[in-house]
Image (cartoon, rainbow, N blue to C red):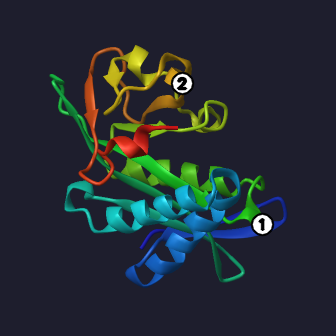
Amino acid sequence: MNTVQIIFKERTLIIRESNKNEQAEIEKIHKAAFEKTEGAEKAQGISYLVRDLFDDETAMPIHSLVAIENEKLIGHILFTKVTITDCPLDIEAQILAPLAVLPDFQSTGVGGRLIDEGLRQLKKAGIDLVFVLGHIDYYPRSGFINDAKSRGFEAPFYIPEEFAGAWMVMELASGFIGKAKGIVKCSDVLNQPQHWRE
């Protein structure tokens, strides 16, 4: 099990792979993280999404990491498999969805540390590209490039032009952006229109 200890802002954070026994607690993190900003119904939907992705064979291999401080789970990030259809190149790709940090620990850098460690592990695992649909100012801090469609990668479902920048891509192995293109297809659970609407 990959485990890293990160010390920043006088905090000691442990990031490691999650285990089966933590799935219920992970769902609670996502529900709590999104309840205030997205409402109870959408927050519950996100927690169900996480639960269902854990059981989705088409999402494998998944990369599920938790952030721990003082033996308490405070954050979680999930990466699942995607394929790129109509693409002439053989590409190993994943999508980041979702990421959550408990409200009391938001805006402290925990989310960024989870992203960075997740990307480091994906690169080590031989992943070439990573996609995310998310906040246009937040994810580029970790190296994501806004508007993946303009780079040749169509989202699974239509994204209105005003939100085009929220569909992002990151290259972990060089030589794909500018040469590869196609439609990104997610796992069965994530490849549903309700997960691609604001």
**Residue 77 visible from this viewpoint:** yes
Residue 75 visible at all: no
Name the residue that disc number 2 marks: 163
In this rendering, would 57 be left or right of 98?
left
Of 32 and 178, nearer the camera is 32
Q: Return the residue at label 1.
A: 104
* The N terminus, quarter of image: bottom left
> What amino acid type is highlighted by mark number 2?
Phe
Q: Where is residue 186 drawn, in percent x and y?
A: 28, 44
Describe the element under mark 1 as helix, strand or loop.
helix
Which of the marked residues, 2 or 1, is nearer the chain's N terminus? Answer: 1
Q: How many marks?
A: 2
Depth check: 116 or 107 in front?
A: 107
Give the residue type that dot 1 points to: Asp
**How many residues crowd around disc 1 within 10 Å: few (fewer than 14), some, or many (20 or more)?**
few
Judge whether 135 appears above or below 100 on screen.
above
